Amino acid sequence: MKIHEYQAKELFARYGIAVQDQAVITNAEEARAAAERLGGFVVVKAQVLVGGRGKAGGVKLARSADEAVGAARSILELTIKDLPVEKVMIAPAADIGKEYYVGLTLDRAAKQFILMVSKAGGVDIEELAVERPQEILRFHINPLDGIDEAGLKACLSQAFETPHLLEQASDVVRKMYQLTIEKDCSLVEINPYALVDGETLLALDAKVIFDDNALYKHPDVEVMKNPEEYSRDEIDAKAANLSFVSMDGEIGCIVNGAGLAMATMDIIKLYGGTPANFLDVGGSSNPEKVLNALQIITRNPRVKAILINIFGGITRCDDIANGILMAMKQIDIKLPMVIRLIGTNEEEGRALLADAGFEVAEQLSAAVQKVVSVA
Amino acid sequence: MSILIDDKTRVIVQGITGRDGSFHARAMVTDGTNIVGGVTPGKGGQKLDEIPVYDSVAECIKATDVDASVIFVPAGFASGAIREAADAGVPLIICITEGLPVVEMVSNYHYVQRKGLRLIGPNCPGLISPGKCKIGIMPARIHKPGSVGVISRSGTLTYEVVYNLTTSGYGQSTCIGIGGDPVIGSTFTDMLELFEQDSETDAVIVIGEIGGEDEEAAAEFIKTRMSKPVVAFISGRTAPPGKRMGHAGAIISGGKGTPEAKIRAFNAAGVPVADKPDEIPALLRKQRGR
């Protein structure tokens, strides 16, 4: 789960990470009072859940309250990477001496947390990692051991050259790590971590991503959820306990299991079709889930055909067949539907569907070719 | 032979009285697995059919020798269950449970590792040595005994591949689902090493997916250390970057974990990558005939 910069900064403040005073507005006129309160010379930043705001014109400096209103108005009219800007954050313009990058995330290969630090802050860290990897300092943290303080100091002292800066940076890393552990973050990033007024390091931007699997432990995090992170279909699918991702193709997919669901989409593409969605109905075989899945898929106007691909293990093919029959009674599905059932109780499932006039495929490739031809 | 498990493996089930635990404990017994006990705190002394239930793993191993434990408890209790099995010294711990927070798993991984034990999963279907032992949730009847090893990050996709192998006449030595999470107890490389050593495995299928760099590490291992033929499949070629595709670990992020990089790595290691699961048997035939 992603949160906005302003939310991440509120969280940082709770953890004692130095951030600036800020105001969040949804209407350009509100920028006037905010800018006046924050000293007149301010930065106005779009709050959207994607990177690249600066390049898209979503970050502007304003030297007066009037300018702030103008900046806020133009930013609120923007759509950045398909997301309309609905909120802007206003903060005092800082006198930046130097910009650093500090990020804490998971190193999947090492199975440890990894701190990444660079003196080349303010730039896209992914680009930096590809173009000048030697400019990124790396430091691992094994949670069973905690932070190796001597190692951390040795790492950070290569970027933060005075004792005063080193002390601030070490403190920030400890707090970022505490936040990561306590709130189950998959990323905590400060870019830029900026030197202002010659001696103070401040988080001028903030990015935090949370592990969806841990949200149940953190109601205070869950309330920060922004609905625009997900499409309406994704939200409804989640409520129905379906794993769903919207795509822009024409063939609606219902599959059991994430790996098979991905492979099914890939094979659709291989045969010249385009998948409209990723949908994993999961391991249990509640017929209700098939109904919910079909409801979500059939309301997508781009969908021209539906492919149901089930490999029964825990999931029973007869339950899936009953779900399909139940859905046919409750929703008027005019789209062509190709069904492939195999595995646990496949004979029962096929018989149920044959009685209702459906043709049921056994082989995946054949089923995909068929659905691509009718879409 | 087979890897990790055989007809003598003594297995316990953590969470045996729960809905999933009891269902799959019975299915494993039906499929020939030697289930010697179950654990559910507070239900010690009860029985599931003929299987004695204990309050803790420690109690259970006082009563019987144990080679492996399979965990079916809900996500909120799974880390505790993994550590309980590790504290009791169970050599092979298989966690079926899906939805463990990654921060917890990072600690769990090192906790098990430091005790010199082996963890498979979480978020996995388990493993099966057809005709000998099944520890997990896969349908045993699509398998058949043979000499092909299968390693996968997925569940039903593995069934699809195994079904294609079996119907093409290729039986399996052991099939392992290592799990779809970002941090898992055993990687492709760990399992490839065991298959390379196993005298009755003569080829291996690797079923990877987008996210992380385990497939790239596996390709490197195959290139430098593996003599047996390997065929791969990668799912998620159509997945958009930044989106988690069901499995918590199946996400292309920061330019890493792309299918192209994985396919390139396998090809560079001399491993053909099938475009569809039903192409795997033919590629296997070709590789074995080299």
Image (cartoon, helix red, strand yellow):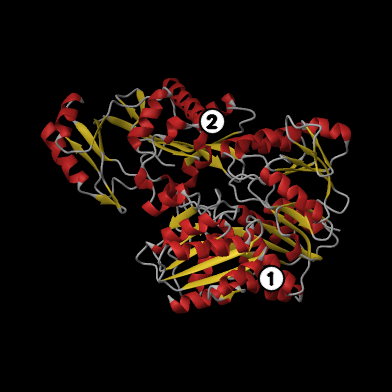
Alpha-carbon span between mark 1 and mark 2: 43 Å
Q: Look at 67% across and 32% down and name the residue there.
A: B80
Q: Residues within 10 Å of mark 2 (few under 14, many from 20)?
A: some
Residue appearing at x 42%, y 44% in the figure: A125
Among the 4 quarters of the image, the one containing residue B234:
bottom right
Q: Secondary structure at mark 1?
A: helix
Residue sitting nearer the eye, A369 or B175:
A369
Foreground mark, 1 or 2, reads 1
Foreground residue among A95 and B112:
B112
Q: Identify the residue under disc 2.
A: A181
**Image quarter of residue A354:** bottom right
Specify whether residue B143 is in view. Answer: yes
Q: Residue at x 26, y 51 (%)?
A: A79
| Label 2: element kind | helix
Quadrant housing residue A142 = top right
The chain carrying label 1 is B
On screen, residue A47 versus residue B51, left or right, reads left
For the N terminus of chain A, give its image quadrant: top left
Q: Quadrant of the C terminus of chain A?
A: bottom left
The location of residue A97, given as percent across then percent down, is 31, 30
Say which chain tag 2 marks.
Answer: A
